[in-house]
Image: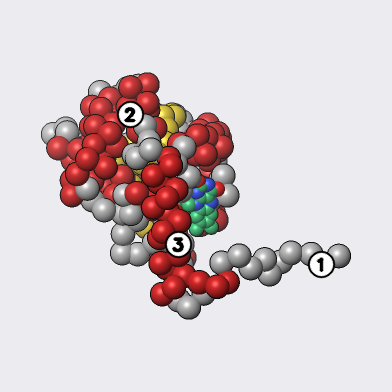
Amino acid sequence: MKTRRKVLLLIGSAKQPRSTSGALGSYLLERLGEQGYQTETLLIHKSLRTEGGSNTLLTATDRADIVVLAFPTYIDSLPASVTKALELVAKHRLARGNGQQRLLAIANCGFPEAHHNNTALDICRLFAWEAGFSWAGGLSLGGGEALDGQPLGEAGRRARNAARALDLAAEAVAMDEAVPQKPVDLMAKPIVPSWMYTFIGQFGWKRRARKFGTRKKLQDRPFQRVV
Ligand SMILES: Cc1cc2nc3c(=O)[nH]c(=O)nc-3n(C[C@H](O)[C@H](O)[C@H](O)COP(=O)(O)O)c2cc1C
């Protein structure tokens, strides 16, 4: 009997209960599930809390045909927990990686332009090479806050391009191909014009500051050096 191929989603956001990383990764997993893949999802920050959790992450990685890493960009790079997980996986796989397993990364960032994810995705590509994965490609979404972790199927027009990009990526992955340029371009398309994103973002920050009683402190610079 032919065994079903396995896909493991590693979510690199610590946001609970929902994150944009989770929404994007889960949508892709659903599509791959429809293509006959057996799916598994782990939250990286939760897994790394215990030795048992870290071992589960390593064994899940070992048995996956394809690993999907979905994460938010932090300071142009990966969140610390994701870096830690990649270091663990690389060390664990020193003698194992033979390029038969594949790695696909999905990055999302807060700035409206998707190119802010470039460095983080380059890090993932180099990790794949170092750890013996074949690089299946990287998808990059800007303005991830506009989705705010909402499942793509419920986010309407805002998620239209991201969903289409992931549909196409799933088709390519199922045929053992790398993610082609079309889904990469679709994912990178701004969700809303950047002036609108900034305007809504400013409004959101002020509303949040009011909620926490810090509206008058928004211009504070507590770490500014006084000369
Ligand atoms: C500590 C921290 C650092 C961040 N650094 C960046 C950054 O360098 N560039 C950027 O565009 N967004 C940055 N962001 C914004 C997140 O990437 C953005 O909010 C993302 O949509 C969160 O995705 P998630 O819901 O999957 O966690 C940062 C957020 C945090 C909390």
Kindly state the secondary structure of the residue where label 2 is placed: helix
Q: Nearer the viewer, residue 49 or 193?
A: 193
> Residue 169 — which label?
none
> Residue visible at 39% across and 32% down?
188
Q: With 155 as the anchor, is 84 left or right in this view? A: right
Disc 1/disc 3 C-alpha distance (Å):
27 Å
Residue 126 appears in the rendering = yes
Q: Nearer the viewer, residue 203 or 142?
A: 203
- Comparing labels 2 and 1, the label whose residue is closer to the camera: 1
> Residue visible at 31% across and 59% down?
18
Q: With 160 as the anchor, is 204 left or right in this view? A: right
Kindly state the secondary structure of the residue where label 3 is placed: helix
> Residue visible at 37% across and 21% down?
181
In the rendered image, the residue lying farthest to the bottom is 213
The residue singled out by tag 2 in the image is 186
- Look at the numbered discs 3 and 2 and tell me whether their residues touch, using CB distance below 8 Å: no
Image quadrant occupied by the N terminus: top left
Does 107 appear above or below 80? above
The residue singled out by tag 3 in the image is 205
Of the residues shown, which amino acid type is indicated by label 3?
A: Trp
The residue singled out by tag 1 in the image is 226
Q: Earlier in the sequence, mark 2 or mark 1?
A: 2
